[in-house]
Image (spheres, rainbow, N blue to C red):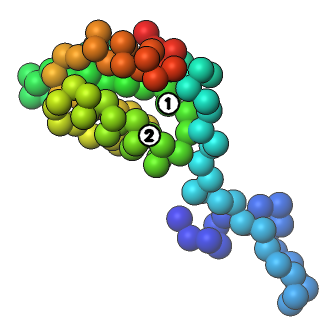
Amino acid sequence: MSKKNNKVGIVYSTNPDYQYQYEDDDIQPDTLPPAQQKLHVRMERSGRGGKTVTVVDNFVGTDDDLNALGKTLKTKCGVGGSVKDGQIIIQGDFRERIVTLLNDLGYKAK
């Protein structure tokens, strides 16, 4: 989307010195402390070619913090995975291990 379409409040001004305010799509919420996070851990198989993956949802925070948590979980489980669309995807069924790891790190997970 172009910057022209993200103007906030005013559509047009005849004042040549007027500074438009723009929406900022890249605003990310501050990362909540682990004790305030309520993460959901589930297993998925559909839409993945029959492969089983463990998905961690509902993380509130920046992409950098989500990537760091994803890297920690992948390392502790000793498997691959990815972080995209606000989800941590771990290859294989590691629900119990991930819930235990998240609880040890101070997160509320179920």
Residue at numbered disc 1: 59
> Which residue is pictured at 37% across the width and 14% down the height?
99
Residue type at tag 1: Phe
Give the SS element for disc 2: helix
**First in sequence: mark 1 vs mark 2:** 1
Q: In this view, does 91 lie to the left or right of 82?
A: left
- For label 2, the crowd category at 10 Å Cα-Cα, with few meaning under 14, some 14 to 19 and many 20 or more, is some
Residue 103 x %, y %: 45, 15
> Which residue is pictured at 36% across the width and 19% down the height?
101
Residue at numbered disc 2: 66
Mark pair 1, 2: CA separation: 7 Å
Residue 85 x %, y %: 39, 41
> Which residue is pictured at 33% across the width and 35% down the height?
72
- For label 1, the crowd category at 10 Å Cα-Cα, with few meaning under 14, some 14 to 19 and many 20 or more, is many
Residue 45 makes an appearance in the image: no
Q: Using the rendered view, name the quadrant where residue 102 is placed.
A: top left
- Above-or-below relation of 82 to 23: above
Residue 33 x %, y %: 61, 30
Task: Assess whether mark 2 and mark 1 are in contact (beta carbons under 8 angstroms).
Answer: yes
Residue type at tag 2: Leu
Residue 48 makes an appearance in the image: yes
> Which residue is pictured at 9% across the width and 28% down the height?
49
